[in-house]
Image (cartoon, rainbow, N blue to C red):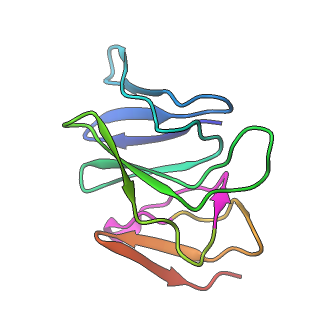
Amino acid sequence: SAAAAVVGGVLYVAGGVTSAKLQAWDGASWTVLRDLPEPRNGAAAAELDGALLVMGGRTRGTRAAWSSTLRYDPRTDAWAAAPPLPRAGPRGAGGPPRPGGRAVPVGGLCHPSCSVAALIVGGWGIHPGR
């Protein structure tokens, strides 16, 4: 499944089961943008400071989840690595609520257990999960 989030009034859809595609919907048409560095299935996406974050996910055919986070800058059409998910661990198929200006991947497939991690500009903070 693809990850989606709104950044600057534009809907971005990233990845999918076998896809590394990034597409944007501006309310009138779709635009194909720079691909993700690798295909991601079940990642979470959120806006943070005008950028698109794609967090976690997994590769098709495996339940192993990733802890990496990617940051897409719509102004430059470029991807960069962002701080990886910390000891909250790799996760896939989670949801990204965004309270208080933070990207917070919640739930999903976590091994061995889930915690809540909040990415605040510059780094992650950990909040124990249940």
Give the side of residue 11 with respect to residue 57, left or right: left
Start-end of magenta stretch: 90-104
Q: Where is residue 13 in the image (x, y as percent from the top left)?
A: 47, 33
The foreground one among 118 and 34 is 34
| Image quarter in which the C terminus is found | bottom right
Is 97 contained in the magenta span?
yes
- Direction from residue 13 to residue 120 in the image, left or right: left
**Residue drawn where x is 58% and y is 36% of the image:** 39
Name the side, left or right, on which 119 lies relative to 85: left
Tell which residue pokes out farthest to the bottom in this image: 128
Q: In which quarter of the image is residue 49?
A: bottom left
**60 versus 101 height, above or below:** above
In this view, the residue in front, 57 or 95, is: 57
Is residue 23 shown in magenta? no
The outermost residue toward the top is 29
**Labels in figure, total:** 0
Query: Residue at the spot x=19%, y=37% of the render?
Result: 75
Q: Nearer the viewer, residue 104 or 70?
A: 70
Q: What x and y, as percent, mark residue 94?
A: 63, 56
Location of residue 38 with respect to 82 vertically, above or below: above
Query: For the stretch drawn in magenta, what is the main secondary structure?
Result: loop
Residue lying at 39% horizontally and 54% vertically, measured from the top left:
81
* Residue 72 on image: x %, y %: 34, 44
Q: Quadrant of the N terminus?
A: top right
Q: Position of residue 52 (x, y in %)?
A: 36, 46
Question: Is residue 13 placed above or below 52 in the rendered structure?
Answer: above
